[in-house]
Image (cartoon, grey):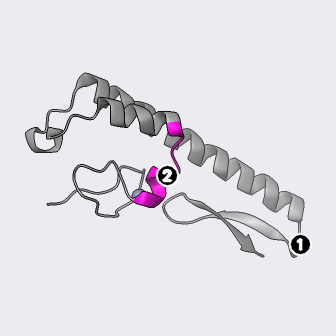
Amino acid sequence: MNHHCHWTGCEQQVPPKMWGCNRHWFMLPRELRAKIWATYVPGQEVTKQPSAEYLSAAREVRAWIADYITKSVAEREVVQSRLNGRNLKKVVLDDIGTPHLKED
Ligand SMILES: [Zn+2]
């Protein structure tokens, strides 16, 4: 069974009934998580026929993630330019787009 987290770029293996790994799942806004739960039909991972509602919720989640990553990158650039050589914390993105605070 090969089923990975649906976060853009995350390769973490998760059980088929899970949307994604814990770390990324809990980064989603509560309303989006509720939508996924509300539209998820047990067994859809077996039939491979998720409902139109689920697909629409999943699309919304992907759009949210794209927006989140874009904003994180913009924020990181602003922070870096403000620091300008000072030894303060800055935001860096790891290879799967998750922001972290890091000492310069
Ligand atoms: Zn993940």
Q: What separation in Å lies between label 2 and label 1 (alpha carbons)?
A: 34 Å
Q: Which residue position holds label 2?
A: 26
Q: Which residues are magenta?
A: 22-30
How many marks the image carries: the answer is 2
Q: Tell me the residue at 90%/72% (across/down).
A: 86
Q: Is residue 33 left or right of residue 86?
A: left
Image side of residue 68 versus residue 45, left or right: right
Pick whichever, 50 or 71, lies toward us.
50
Could you tell me residue 23's position as x and y percent?
47, 60
Q: Residue at x 54, y 40 (%)?
A: 29
Q: Residue at x 75, y 55 (%)?
A: 77
Is residue 25 at least partly visible in the picture? yes
**Horizontal arrangement in the rendering, residue 67 relative to residue 32 (left or right):** right
Asked if residue 61 can be seen in this view, the reply is no
Direction from residue 16 to residue 5 in the image, left or right: right
The quadrant of the picture occupied by the C terminus is bottom right
The reply to whether the magenta stretch includes residue 26 is: yes
SS at circle 2: loop
Examine the rendered structure and indicate whether residue 6 appears above or below residue 87: above
Q: Which mark is residue 85?
A: 1
- The question of residue 35 being in magenta is answered with no
Of all residues, the one furthest to the left in this rendering is: 47
* Ligand 1 rendered quadrant: bottom left
Residue at figure coordinates x 35%, y 37% from the top left = 37
Q: Which one is nearer the viewer's eye here, 75 or 100?
A: 100
In terms of image quadrants, where is residue 4? bottom left
Residue 46 picture location, percent across and down: 10, 44
Instruction: Point out which mark residue 53 bears.
Output: none
On-image quarter of the N terminus? bottom left
Q: How many neighbours does mark 2 have within 10 angstroms: few (below 14), some (14-19), or many (20 or more)?
A: few
